[in-house]
Image (cartoon, rainbow, N blue to C red):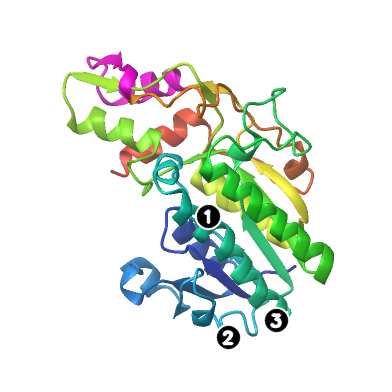
Amino acid sequence: MDLNGASVLVTGATGFVGPYLVQALCRKGARVKILSLSEGDVSSDLRAADLEIVTGDITKPETLDLVTKGVDIVFHLAAIANVDYAIQNPVKTYDVNVRGTLNLLEEVRKYQVKKFVYVSSSHIYGIPQYIPVDEKHPIAPREPYSASKAAAENIVNSYSNTYGINTAVVRPFNIYGPGQDESFLIPSIVKQALYGNAIMEVGNLEPTRDFTYITDIVAGFLKIAESGSGVYNIGSGVEVKVGDVVHKIVDIINPDIEIRPVVDRQRSGGVEIPRLCADISRLKGIGWEPNVGLDDGLRKMINMI
């Protein structure tokens, strides 16, 4: 589907990924509409873009009427996306991530939106049975966040099968970049290295993750909207130990910092996923490639602070 001239609705546009996606869509020539809880949540950068702002709450269907009318593509990013917050707030997490997705799909069905792109998570795989993880890997969520994403995926798939809605599900692995909330790993470590003490206390350094820079993520979203359907992993395809990422950041900012693991900063074994790395061959098959390596991405991020 050609994005130039298309009417596109983005939920979650005021989060971390959303503003990057909105700006990329505008550069593509799309007519962008964003759904926000209130106009006050919209940044000055987004306000300066050529877009329409509508207010509504995905957990309250009565606020969504007409939001998708005349829309060609919906990117559904709005979610509770922090694993630790979701563990503390499971009911709210299900309300937003599951019921909110269902409410939005009803509007998509009502107004015959041409394509629905749902942003899920790699956490739904749980502890991998093999590495790298492809899209056929069994789903085994281990905590409320990933369970809510898996449930929402099932609803998306059911609407596709039942009502003929063209859908795509994106499973990002670990995203990072400028503007990310400090409750996530990389911005937390960057902040500590820049403004903390000579001793940096960290959690478990042993797990591995697949880190992907924000601009590569957005490029993948656009490619999927243009020519993808079904389920896609999006990541770098490179498995990196968390401890190596921490050391890379410290080496860039201040190599004299002492890194000290602390047990009470670690997730429980019932929740922690020891390894994650994406098989991205399916997304590569429609013409996407990651362009920003981890070292370059970390430097870009740190230099923009």
Q: Amino acid under label 3? A: Lys
Residue 238, compared with residue 300, is above or below; it is above
Q: Quadrant of residue 248?
A: top left
Residue designated by label 2: 66
Residue 242, compared with residue 280, is above or below; it is above
* Separation of residues labelled 2 and 3 (CA atoms): 9 Å
Please tell me the numbered disc located at residue 247: none
Of 243 and 160, nearer the camera is 160
| Mark 2 / mark 1, whichever is N-terminal | 2
Q: Amino acid under label 1? A: Tyr
Of 93 and 239, nearer the camera is 93
Residue drawn 55% across and 65% down? 100
* Separation of residues labelled 3 and 1 (CA atoms): 23 Å
Q: Amino acid under label 2? A: Leu
Q: Position of residue 260 (x, y in %)?
A: 28, 14
| Mark 3 / mark 1, whichever is N-terminal | 1
Residue designated by label 1: 94
Q: Position of residue 210 (x, y in %)?
A: 56, 30
SS of the residue at dot 3?
helix
Of 101 and 71, nearer the camera is 101
* Separation of residues labelled 2 and 1 (CA atoms): 24 Å
The segment highlighted magenta reads: 242-264
| Mark 2 / mark 3, whichever is N-terminal | 2
> Which callout, 3 or 1, points to the residue nearer the camera?
1
Please tell me the numbered disc located at residue 110: 3
Q: Position of residue 173 (x, y in %)?
A: 58, 38
